[in-house]
Amino acid sequence: AQSVTQLDSQVPVFEEAPVELRCNYSSSVSVYLFWYVQYPNQGLQLLLKYLSGSTLVESINGFEAEFNKSQTSFHLRKPSVHISDTAEYFCAVSDRRNAGNMLTFGGGTRLMVKP
Amino acid sequence: NAGVTQTPKFRVLKTGQSMTLLCAQDMNHEYMYWYRQDPGMGLRLIHYSVGEGTTAKGEVPDGYNVSRLKKQNFLLGLESAAPSQTSVYFCASSYPGTGYGYTFGSGTRLTVV
């Protein structure tokens, strides 16, 4: 079984400032890692994922996340946030061997970008 | 380009009433899932299906039943609603195998009074 801990429930930040949303996971097996974003009153959308290869993965809107196996972390970062990045962000993991492709989600981090 | 469609979007039930939430996907995805979202707890898996006619329990299945009679539809039933089932319910679908991301519906906000 896996578990995911998102260390901050809310992160307030000013526009154009950098931000890091922290995610740690626990698993006895190899995992895939995901970040999802949820805008108000919408479903979740896949932001980026790590499957294998380079430990740094990027999204099309400037976010990046780095897989750190030794620290079992997958923190999400953006060097300069915009008002439109205000949303809730969820980190998730799945067991690489999990035939059902089930995801285990963290509790979410609400990113609040202030002008 | 509908993706995953959930109906209804909102519902208020009285304790003890029953209802069915419908999820429909048009992407020919093999796998489908029902999650509930509660503040501070993220999303928790209720039931899932890896193909037409198959279902399995997730992390929090008690009080819910599901059916997948057609590949494109995944129904979630509440037989006797309880206030603890007040939540936002999300359906999702994915390709078979591991490492695929989900496509989510826009959610159903259910209140049980």
Image (tube, coloured by chain):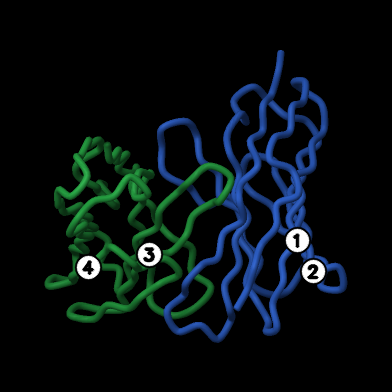
Q: Which residue is mark 1?
A: A24
Q: Amino acid at mark 3?
A: Ile
State which chain is coloured blue. A
Q: Amino acid at mark 4?
A: Val
Which residue is at a point 71% across and 58% down the rendered structure image?
A: A57
Q: Are marks 4 and 3 in contact (CB under 8 Å)?
A: yes
Above-or-below relation of A47 to A82: below
| Crowd band around label 3 with a 10 angstrom C-alpha radius: few (<14), some (14–19), many (20+) | many
Residue A71 placement, left or right of B49 = right
Which residue is at a point 77% across and 60% down the rendered structure image?
A: A56
- Of all chains, the one bearing label 4 is B
Q: Amino acid at mark 2?
A: Thr
Q: Are marks 2 and 3 in contact (CB under 8 Å)?
A: no
Numbered disc 2: secondary structure:
loop
Above-or-below relation of A71 to A86: below
Q: Which residue is mark 3?
A: B46
Q: Which residue is mark 4?
A: B66
Q: Which residue is mark 2?
A: A72
- Of all chains, the one bearing label 2 is A
